[in-house]
Image: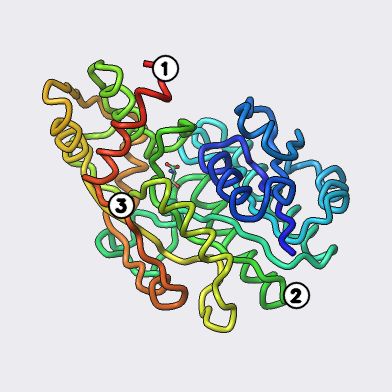
Amino acid sequence: MERIMVIGAAGQIGSELTMALREKFGNDNVVAVGRKTKPSEELRNSGPFEFSNVLNYDEMKAMVQKYRIDTIYLMAAILSATGEQKPMLAYRVNNDGLINVLEIARELKLERVLIPSSIAVFGPETPRDNTPNETILKPKTMYGISKVHGELLCDYYFYKYGLDVRGLRYPGIISYKTPPGGGTTDYTVEMYRAAAEGKPYTCFVKEDTVLPMMYMPDALKSIMDLAEADLSKLKHHSDFNITAMSFSAGELAESIRQYKPDFKVTYEPDFRQAIADSWPRSLDDSAAREEWGWEPEYDLDAMTRDMLENLPKVLGM
Ligand code: SER
C-alpha cells in the first residue's frame, strides 16, 4: 500500500503535488509536511498536515514511523536566487535535508524516495542547446552545487544500499496556484500574474533570455510517472533531463499579448541574469522518454491560455 509523505508540501510544486497524490492514493495516505510557509486551507483540511523541518532528523524519523510511510517525496529546497543571497542556508537545507531523508529511508527500509533535481546542475561550460543527459556538471550557484551533490548521493544510496531513489531535472516550473519562491525562472509566473492584473511588468532577465520550462500539470505527471516506472527499465535513477518547451522572455510576452494586446514589459536584468546565462536553453530528454515514457502535454500556447483563464480566479478578480 502507498503511504506517502511530501516534505516541502506548502511550496510551489509540493502544494499541488500533495493534492494530486491525495486524489490518486486517498487523502489519509498522503501526509503533508511543511516548515513555515502558511499552507492553504485545502492542503490543511484535506488530509494530515504536520509542521516540521527536514533538518530535524529525529522529528522527521518519528513522523515517518508514526504514519508508517513507505514513499517520501522531498520537495523542500532553497532555489537558485535565494541560494545566492543565503548560500549557507541553501547548503544546509539542500544537502543536510537530503542526507537526512536518505538515511531515514535506509534505516527504516522505505520503498522509494523521489527528489527533483534541476537544470541548475548545469553551468557555463555545459553545451547550452539540446543539452545531453550526460554532460559537464560544473554549476556556479550554491543551489546547482547542492543538486549535483544530491544526484550523486541518490545514486550512491541506490548502488550501495539498494534504496530506490529516483529524480529528474526540472526546468522552470510555471503554475497559477502557488507562486514560486526564490528561483531564477520566477519571472515567467510574475509576468503572467502582472498581465492578469492588467499591470505592466519589469522583467529581471533580458528579452532574449531563453530557458527550458514546463507547465505544472506536466511537472506533476512527470514525477508521479517516474515513481511508477518499472525499475528494471531504468538505466538512470536520479538525474533524468526532462523538458516541455523553451522560449525567451520576449516570446512569453508575445504569447500573453495574443490575449492581452496592451500588455507592456520592460527589461531590467539583475544578478539573476548571470544565473540564467549559465543554464541550458534547451534539453535533450530522450533518456526519460525511452526509459519511462516521458511525454509533456502543454506547449507555450496551451499554457498561456490556461494560465490567463485561471489566474483571475486565483487573484480574486
Ligand atoms: N526554477 C528553479 C530556479 O529558478 C530551477 O530549478 O532556481
Instruction: Point out residue 86 in the picture as x, y percentages from the top left corner.
Output: 57, 32
Instruction: Point out residue 45 in the picture as x, y percentages from the top left corner.
Output: 69, 31
Q: Secondary structure at mark 2?
A: helix
Mark earlier in primary sequence (3, 2): 2
Total marks shown come to 3
**Displayed-image quarter of ligand 1:** top left
Which residue position is annotated with label 2? 161
Judge depth for marks 3 and 1 and give the one in front. 1
Which residue position is annotated with label 1? 316
Judge depth for marks 1 and 2 and give the one in front. 1
| Amino acid at pointer 2 | Tyr
Mark 3 is surrounded, within 10 Å at the Cα level, by few (under 14), some (14 to 19) or many (20 or more) other residues, namely some
**Quadrant into which the C terminus falls:** top left
Mark 2 is surrounded, within 10 Å at the Cα level, by few (under 14), some (14 to 19) or many (20 or more) other residues, namely few
| Amino acid at pointer 3 | Tyr
**Quadrant into which the N terminus falls:** bottom right
Q: Where is 290 relative to 280, above or below?
A: below
Q: Nearer the viewer, residue 60 or 215?
A: 215
Mark earlier in primary sequence (3, 1): 3
Instruction: Point out residue 255 in the picture as x, y percentages from the top left corner.
Output: 17, 38
Q: CA distance from mark 3 to mark 2?
A: 37 Å
Q: Nearer the viewer, residue 161 or 95?
A: 161
Which residue position is annotated with label 3? 298
Mark earlier in primary sequence (1, 2): 2
Q: CA distance from mark 3 to mark 1?
A: 25 Å
Judge depth for marks 3 and 2 and give the one in front. 3
* Residue 151 found in image quarter: bottom right
Q: Secondary structure at mark 1?
A: loop
Q: Secondary structure at mark 3?
A: loop
